[in-house]
Image (tube, rainbow, N blue to C red):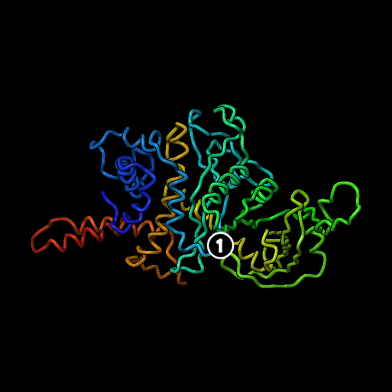
Amino acid sequence: MCLVKSFVVVLQQLSGVMTNPTWKHFELLMIGWVFARRRTVTGMIEASGQTGLRHHSVFHRVFAKARWSLDRLGLAVLDLVRPFCGETVFLAVDDTLANKRGSKVFGTGMHYDPMLSSRSVKVTRWAHSWVVLGVIVRFPLWPERPFCLPILFRLYLNRKAAAKHRRVYRTRPELAVNLLSVLCKRDENTAFHLLADSSYGGESVLANLPANCDLTSRMVLNARLHAPPPERTPGTKGRPRKRGERLLSPKQMLQHRGRRVTVDLYGRSTRMRLVDAVARVFKVPDRPLRIVATEALAGGRGREVFYTTRHTENAVTILQWYSQRWSIEVTFRESKQHLGFQEPQGWSRQAAERTAPIAMLLYGLIVYWFATTGHRKFQRTTRPWYTRERHASFSEMLGTLRHQSLTQQISQLSLSGPRAQKVKQTLQRLVLLNV
């Protein structure tokens, strides 16, 4: 089993982060990851056709023992897609769960599951909790469609798991700041802009942003806002003031007259009333923010408050920036549903920390390959019940990669005779139906 040559070329650009022997085994695992029904290491060995050719422990050691850095691999993916990121590189950060079984798996614990919980019922799961930093990319093939390609990962340990494994406990926002620091220190001359929901928009992130990174996030309606401190007059005694006068909260701002706008957000037009102002939050008084309070005039979004450290930007642009954050939620869904993000069974520390993130890195590589090369041979199945033209879904991108890889192998078969071409065409049709 092998992958189509155009995708192998993409993979080869990442080979510098591993030794040559480790990379050869990693490449075989990537073949298995694309074709396997279940993404365990043994499942990948079987799908790549390596059963019996090499001992299975060789492939397990790629994740559990081999010397390579997951951060370097993710940053190599960033270098690959950097030409499509624009002058300012937009980032998104969030966390997601990967359900697990067994008490001996490193880093597992009970975590709150927002997908299964409601306002009245709190549901927890035995799982890994991953904090993921991704880069938001717009390809020329779909200029209006943002993709979030994950590049850096940290496994969050709750207090009990951190004590069990003798690790210093760090919150999810602290892990997010660590990921930002790794990226921003590497590219100090690049301007980054982080998009995050309210979980990563608090003091612990806002007060510790790298110098070359801005933040757009959400805040609560009753946030305490202040004006900048007044200029200190000569002869004044005591320490200088950190904050100016108390300003209206976002909830009070919405009680005053605002302007009505129609904004394209999340693929549809939204009518809303908004009020904006420049202010500073109580906990981080030295950073001016543009506060945007909105109230939906139609639909169920209600009242929301957004802010950005780029305080000179207009309110509509800030809302459009924040709407791109949703692309990381799409990435989580596709990685779990089509690439088996939750399926790896490694239980040691390095295996647990390095196996599952490969599913999300592979997601980014497949999207990049399809947008630059793979779309040329994309064959959409005719479905007349879809009345509107739509973009290729990720399942169709993955299906195209599988189809082209298998078609390449069929074309290389050394069949002879008058019906050889017909046999190859029949095999290709069967591949298309099954992929």
At x 22%, y 58%, the residue is 427
Q: Is residue 214 above or below residue 179?
A: below
Q: Residue 423 in the image: x percent, y percent?
A: 16, 60
Category of crowding for the residue at label 1, using alpha-carbon neighbours closer than 10 angstroms: few (below 14), some (14–19), many (at least 20): few
Q: Residue 387 in the image: x percent, y percent?
A: 46, 72
Viewer-side residue, 105 vs 140: 140
Viewer-side residue, 59 vs 341: 59
Q: Is residue 348 above or below residue 278?
A: above
Q: Is residue 315 above or below residue 337?
A: below
Mark 1: secondary structure = strand
**381 left or right, relative to 409:** right
At x 83%, y 59%, the residue is 248
Q: Residue furthest left?
A: 417
Viewer-side residue, 232 vs 388: 232
Q: Is residue 186 visible?
A: yes
The quarter holding residue 297 reads bottom right
At x 70%, y 47%, the residue is 203
Q: Residue 82 in the image: x percent, y percent?
A: 46, 59
Q: Is residue 76 above or below residue 274?
A: above
Residue identifier under label 1? 88
Which amino acid is tagged 1? Thr
Q: Is residue 337 visible?
A: no
Q: Residue 8 in the image: x percent, y percent?
A: 31, 54
At x 12%, y 57%, the residue is 415
